[in-house]
Amino acid sequence: MLNFNLKHYVKDLVNIALPIIMGNLGFILIGVGDVLIAGRHSTDTLAAISIATAIINCIVTFGIGILTGISPILSNYRGENQNAKRYFFSAIRFAIILSVLMSLVIIGFIPVIDHLGFEAHLVPMIKQYMLITAFSTFGAYIHCAVKEYLQAFEIVFIPNLVTVFCVFLNVALNILLVFGFGPIPSLGVAGLAIASLIVRYVMGLTLYFYALFKMRPRDYHHTGFYKSLLKIGLPISCAILVEFVAFNIIVIFLGKVSGVYAAAQNIVCTLTTVSFMVPLAISNAIAVKAGFANGAQNTMDFKRYSFIGMALCTGFMAISAVIVTLFPDFLIGLFTKDAELIKITVPVVVYLGIFQVFDGLQIALAGVFKGLKNTKIVFIANFTAYWLISIPLGYTLAFKYGLTLLGFWISLIVSAIVLCIIMLSYLKFCLKKMSA
């Protein structure tokens, strides 16, 4: 009976997670395509977009984090036998408002670039990339909102297939616009930004019209949904922001020393982000299934989906850790042939492997708490681990002890361990409370 149940729960999670993995990998491969093309264009181009995307990600992911609250909220509604379909246009309105606000924040930050101490020849490229990319936020947020909405109904194949298609579209546009072809001139950094803008609008609008056709939702306005979305999504957003800033501030700190360090951090983050897409997809599946079980007050199913999901996430990242540790030169060589860049990056990959195991566990735990509609602990744990421990420790190791990029990654391992300990402890408390 145990084996049958185990297969049942694993199958449920995997059926949701597999298409999401496909889509998540597609989404990140769009970023990987940018890095690959930028690296082939020049190290300066790679350094410039590394710094620009580090800043943009810290802004854009704040809104993305709020929107990720859509699927667990609607999953809980479904578990309570509410009509969750009617919240489609509410989610879209919320996404549009967020996209406008975040675009203005990106544009407003551009003049600050002049005063952050980056290498002078990189500054114009950074500002150009940020200005163009600011206008792509609308497409990105519509895509995220609709994807989360459909995910709550376990509709995951077509949305993620759209993302995979856009990987190839992005590569084609990058090559065409960055290097030029025929009458189209070489646009360099601007070409990368324009390609991203086009791809995000294609992704967002395609998914929007698919959802209209598939779900045929009617407009419904209820302020309670917005309040719930802020209550659940805002802590998630703050947690994601805290983590993103912790990673991307490394680019900013070391980018002021030399652009090559910013490029090295971008490559390492790209490697871990590719593997991270698998546990992230499983975490989304946990949030949906555990959220439905929580809404239906089925404590046993909630526990089983949660713990099986955690095992899947951690197991996959352990395998990934072994792979990156065994083949660091090959993996780094895919992105660059610059000898100095390879020399800086390869030693960090061993520490990346250790970090990945705990990173897989923490994202699974985040999915559990999203399903539980208790996301404040995710923010508190992330803030404690990354801001109170990782950034101060990393800065000390990097600059006082001369470990530079390696010092920051040692601190990230420590913070990931602390993060897991905090969330596991709180989960144990929550489960005791549910059982009682």
Image (spheres, rainbow, N blue to C red):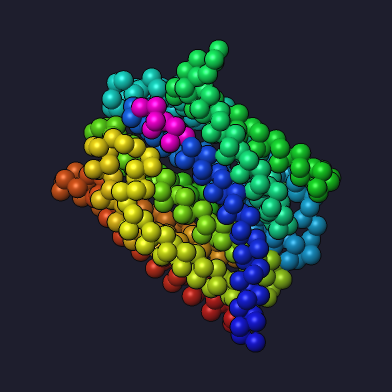
Q: Quadrant of the C terminus?
A: bottom right
Q: Is residue 77 above or below residue 173?
A: below
The residue positioned farthest toward the top in the image shown? 183
> Which image quadrant is residue 359 in?
bottom left
Q: Is residue 134 magenta?
A: no
Residue drawn at 52 percent across, 22 percent down:
177
Q: Is residue 436 visible?
A: yes
Q: Residue furthest left?
A: 401
For residue 39: magenta?
Answer: yes
Q: What percent of the width, then of the height, locates residue 141?
A: 62, 39
Give me the residue at 32% from left, 40% from top: 264
Residue closest to the eye, 112 or 25: 25
Q: Residue furthest bottom?
A: 1
Comparing 391 with 354, the one in front is 354
Residue pictured at 38% horizontal, 39% vertical: 335
Percent position of residue 138, x then y: 62, 33
Q: Which quadrant of the figure has residue 424?
A: bottom left
Report the magenta residues as a range.
34-42
Above or below residue 146? Residue 139 is above
Quadrant containing the N terminus is bottom right
Q: Answer with left or right where residue 39 lies relative to residue 393.
A: right
Can I make out residue 227 in this image?
no
Residue 21 picture location, percent across and down: 57, 54
Q: Is residue 115 left or right of residue 277?
A: left
Residue shown at 82% from the left, 43% from the top: 213
* 10 vs 239: above or below: below
Q: Position of residue 160 (x, y in %)?
A: 64, 48
